[in-house]
Image: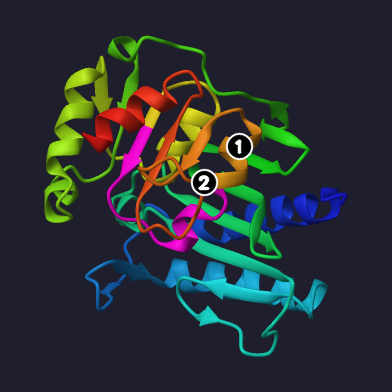
Amino acid sequence: MDLSLFLDFARQTAWEAGRLTLATFQTSHDTEYKADDSPVTIADRAAEEFIRRRIEATFPDHAILGEEFGGSASASGASHRWIIDPIDGTKSFICGVPIYAVLLALEIEGEAAVGIAHFPALDEMVSAATGLGCSRNGRACRVSQKAPLSRAILAHADTSAFARQGKGEAWDRLRQATYYNAGWCDAYGYALVATGRIEVMLDPIMNIWDCAPLLPILREAGGYFGDWQGNERIDAGEALATNAVLRDEVLRLLAK
C-alpha cells in the first residue's frame, strides 16, 4: 500500500495545528486540570478540533481517537483510525518550554502505519510511514549506532513517576548504566532517539495517543519502540525507545 497520500496529509495537518498552538504559546492563559491531574488548555482543544475537522472532511469513513474528545462514534468498525494528541507535553507548553509536540498517527487494520511528531516552537517535524522511511524536516534520519551502553544518553520525563508505577528499581539500573540522563523530554526524547542524537528514552506510563506515532517513526528509523518486554506495541501503558545496537541490553536491565 502506498502511504504517501496519508503521510503528506498528516504532515500538513500537524503543521497547521502547530501554528494554532503557537498563537497562545508563551502567553498568559487559563489552565484546567483533568481527572488524572493532567493539564489542558484552550490550545489543546483548538488544535484537536482543527485536526478532527480536517480528517472528517478528507476521510469521512475513517475513525478518530483524540486525547481531548475521545473516539468518533460515526466510523465504528473502520479499517483506518487516526489517533491525535494535540499537545503532547502540555506541562512544557504552559511553562513556555518549546519541546511540546503535536502528535498524529494513522492505524490501518490495527497497525500504526503513519506517524508525525511536530514540534511547532522548534520548527521541527519527525515523520514516517511504513516502507517510506523516517525523516526530520524532509531529510532522512536514522537512530545512532552508539555502544556501549556506558556511553549512551538516556532521556526521561518525570523521574518520580517510575517509583509511583512500581518501576523505580528498573529505572535506577538503567540510569546507572548509562553515561548521562536528561529530563523534560516527553515526545521530544523519542524524536531524539529516532534522529540519532541520543540512544534511549523511557516512560513508565503512557497513553495510546502518546505512543501511536512513535512506533512507525522508530521502526522506520531503524530503532525499537514498544514496551519494556521487547514487544512493539502502542497500548502497553509504558514505553521504551532505543537504537538497535543497545536494545537487548536495555531490555535485560529493565527485566532484572
Whether residue 124 is visible to the viewer of this picture, yes or no, is no
Task: Give the residue number, with chain letter if any, for mark 2.
Answer: 232
254 above or below 20? above
Q: Residue, x 61% and y 23% (percent of image)?
A: 142
Q: Are marks 2 and 1 in contact (CB under 8 Å)?
A: yes
Q: Position of residue 78 (x, y in %)?
A: 73, 78
Q: Which residues are magenta?
A: 201-214
- Residue 247 relative to residue 38: left or right: right
Badge 1: residue crowd in 10 Å (few <14, some 14–19, many ≥20): many
Q: Quadrant of residue 216?
A: top right
Which secondary structure, mark 1? Answer: helix
The foreground one among 90 and 114 is 114
Instruction: Name the amino acid type tagged 1.
Output: Arg
Task: Give the residue number, with chain letter if any, for mark 1.
Answer: 219
Q: Residue, x 27% and y 49% (percent of image)?
A: 204
The answer to if 112 sits in the magenta stretch is: no
